[in-house]
Amino acid sequence: MPLTRISDPDLTLNDLMTTWPATIDVFLRHKMLCVGCLVTPFHTVEDACAEYRLDQDSFLGELRAAINSPPHPGTAAPDDVGRSL
């Protein structure tokens, strides 16, 4: 299985949120409707940023920060073995 990178322009939002569930909070914080949307298997971060008029580099920085932050107390740590940012 190839390494998944958050900077991959072809990474779908569905794959992003499935691989790194901590990123869901970033979408919700921006009041984005991407979580649970039927087009997440087709849209990318670039598509979402364009739709919501967000700076893509800043948004990717927030996603990276969420991925690298420690899990909330009482939750399991993400299984990121074999994955890369």
Image: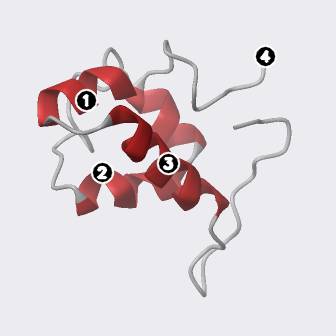
| Residue at mark 4 to residue at mark 1: CA–CA distance | 24 Å
SS label for mark 1: helix
Q: Which mark is nearer the camera, 4 or 2?
A: 2
User: Which residue corresponds to the image point at 51% horizontal and 52% vertical from the top-left?
Assistant: 21
Label ID, residue 27: 2
Disc 3 crowd rating (10 Å Cα; few below 14, some 14-19, many 20+) is few
In-image side of 13 versus 15 (left or right) = left
Q: Which mark lies nearer to you, 3 or 1?
A: 3
Which-is-in-front pick, marks 3 and 2? 3
Question: Tags 1 and 2 in contact by the CB under 8 Å rule?
Answer: yes
Instruction: Choose the circle earlier in sequence order: 3 or 1.
Output: 1
Residue that label 4 marks: 2
Label of residue 48 in the image:
1
Q: Which residue is mark 3?
A: 61
Q: CA distance from mark 3 to mark 1?
A: 15 Å
Q: In the shown orientation, is residue 78 left or right of residue 18?
A: right
Residue 55 in the image: state x and y as whole percent.
29, 38
Instruction: Indicate the amino acid at tag 1.
Output: Ala
Q: Earlier in the sequence, mark 1 or mark 2?
A: 2
Q: Nearer the viewer, residue 42 or 44?
A: 44
Q: Residue at x 21, y 55 (%)?
A: 30
- SS at badge 4: loop
Which amino acid, by three-letter code, is at mark 2? Phe
